């Protein structure tokens, strides 16, 4: 539980503030309440950690908007650069000298780089923010207020707004054989409002209500340092993708509560770094998923997931092949999606062959 510090207000200032609140308009009262909230948040030391890799434009927009809207909230911002080659770390040094920059000698991946930032931070509250997030207001303070009034909650995540203006996916369920199969054959698309067929991507969740969830997608999470000390850091075995599901699973195992917070939002451009190598990162995503099954479900679970994944990608290849014939204007993007699915199937064959060879 956070322990509030003693107020530094003089008695006169406190009296004047109370008098204004009592006599002022609703708008004035709201403004004063917001100021008090920021004062309380400043007493809680907040560390914002942003991992970056070759996404200079998005990083600039992220850090500029963070500084513009949340400067009164955070105590420190730590930017962890995964050996970018596009001038991103130099830009951070030039435009954001007040932020702490950590330059890794190689690309350590998302999980390990975040761990480096967490270890270097000093906040009671840790905000892990993707480099392609854009702040449109102070969305951190409402989440801090929620944590302060809900001491049993260890982690919260805000609503994701995509650049198109629609609501993105901020939550997931833990993967099971059933919800993975629903996803593979498209039942989660056919029955979007059904929890039974909703799949692990939670197509049935409307993101309109603050609610306890199994998984908070790692694009933007706010978590207590004390909870991290109990659960442990992110698993660096997950280079990119899967680390959020694994972390949330371990939080649940430790009895910690995770909440999707619908009253705060930010824009997420999605895939700023992965767009540099779409096939590679698509493959990395499914490698991470298989690693997740292997870690928490053993060899048998991983084998079942491999079969479901093969079904998933085979159906997608067939579907995109049909679309290629009837959507000539989209053939470039369709070809890329077919190439990604073919890469997954080839990797699966190699993985199974290598695994069986090692066993035999």
Image (cartoon, rainbow, N blue to C red):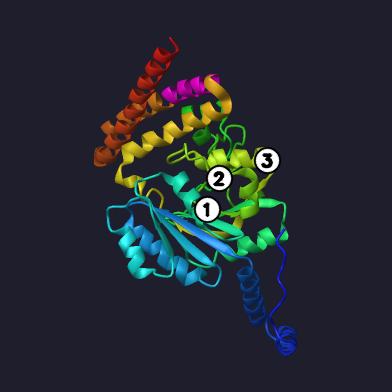
Q: Which mark is first along the chain, 3 or 1? A: 1
Q: Which residue is mark 1?
A: 119
When the figure is inspected, residue 313 is found, relative to residue 192, above or below; the finding is: above
Foreground label between 1 and 3: 1
Nearest the eye: 310 or 149: 149
When the figure is inspected, residue 250 is found, relative to residue 146, above or below; the finding is: above
Nearest the eye: 139 or 178: 139
Report if residue 203 is visible in the image: no
Mark 1 and mark 3: Cα distance apart in space: 21 Å
Q: Position of residue 234 (x, y in %)?
A: 53, 43
Q: Which mark is first along the chain, 1 or 2? A: 1
Q: Secondary structure at mark 2?
A: loop
When the figure is inspected, residue 24 is found, relative to residue 124, above or below; the finding is: below
Q: Position of residue 25 (x, y in %)?
A: 68, 84
Q: State which quarter of the image contains the N terminus.
A: bottom right
**In percent of the image, x 42 and y 17: which residue is there?**
355
Q: Residue furthest top?
A: 360
Report if residue 7 is visible in the image: yes
Say which mark, if any, is on residue 233: 2
Specify whether residue 173 is painted magenta: no
Q: Is residue 166 left or right of residue 15?
A: left
Q: Which residue is mark 3?
A: 254
Q: Secondary structure at mark 1?
A: helix
Q: Secondary structure at mark 3?
A: loop
Q: State which quarter of the image contains the C terminus.
A: top left
The residue range painted magenta reads 300-311
Q: Position of residue 320 (x, y in %)?
A: 33, 31
Q: Is residue 69 left or right of residue 142?
A: left
Mark 2 and mark 3: Cα distance apart in space: 13 Å
Mark 2 and mark 1: Cα distance apart in space: 9 Å
Q: Which mark is first along the chain, 3 or 2? A: 2
């Amino acid at each position: 539980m956070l322990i509030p510090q003693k107020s530094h207000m003089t008695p006169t200032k406190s009296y004047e503030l109370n008098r204004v609140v009592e006599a002022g308009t609703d708008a004035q009262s709201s403004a004063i309440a917001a100021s008090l909230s920021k004062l309380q948040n400043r007493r809680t030391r907040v560390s914002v950690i942003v991992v970056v890799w070759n996404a200079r434009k998005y990083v600039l927009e992220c850090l500029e908007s963070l500084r513009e809207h949340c400067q009164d909230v955070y105590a420190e911002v730590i930017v962890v650069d995964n050996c970018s080659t596009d001038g991103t770390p130099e830009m951070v040094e030039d435009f954001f000298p007040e932020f702490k920059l950590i330059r890794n000698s190689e690309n350590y991946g998302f999980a390990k780089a975040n761990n480096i930032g967490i270890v270097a931070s000093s906040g009671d509250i840790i905000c892990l923010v993707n480099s392609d997030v854009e702040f449109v207001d102070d969305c951190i303070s409402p989440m801090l207020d929620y944590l302060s009034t809900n001491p049993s909650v260890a982690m919260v995540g805000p609503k994701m707004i995509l650049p198109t203006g629609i609501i993105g996916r901020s939550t997931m369920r833990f993967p099971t054989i059933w919800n993975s199969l629903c996803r593979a054959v498209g039942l989660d698309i056919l029955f979007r409002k059904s929890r039974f067929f909703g799949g692990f991507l939670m197509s049935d969740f409307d993101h309109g209500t603050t609610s306890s969830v199994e998984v908070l997608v790692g694009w933007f999470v706010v978590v207590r340092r004390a909870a991290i000390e109990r659960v442990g850091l992110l698993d660096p075995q997950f280079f990119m993708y899967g680390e959020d599901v694994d972390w949330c699973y371990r939080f649940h195992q430790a009895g910690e509560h995770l909440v999707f917070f619908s009253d705060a939002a930010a824009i997420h451009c999605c895939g700023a770094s992965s767009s540099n190598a779409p096939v590679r990162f698509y493959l990395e995503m499914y490698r991470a998923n298989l690693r997740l099954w292997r870690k928490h479900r053993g060899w048998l679970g991983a084998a079942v997931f491999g079969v479901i994944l093969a079904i998933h990608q085979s159906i997608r290849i067939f579907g995109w092949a049909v679309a290629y014939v009837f959507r000539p204007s989209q053939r470039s993007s369709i070809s890329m999606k077919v190439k990604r699915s073919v890469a997954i199937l080839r990797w699966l064959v190699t993985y199974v062959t290598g695994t069986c060879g090692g066993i035999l």
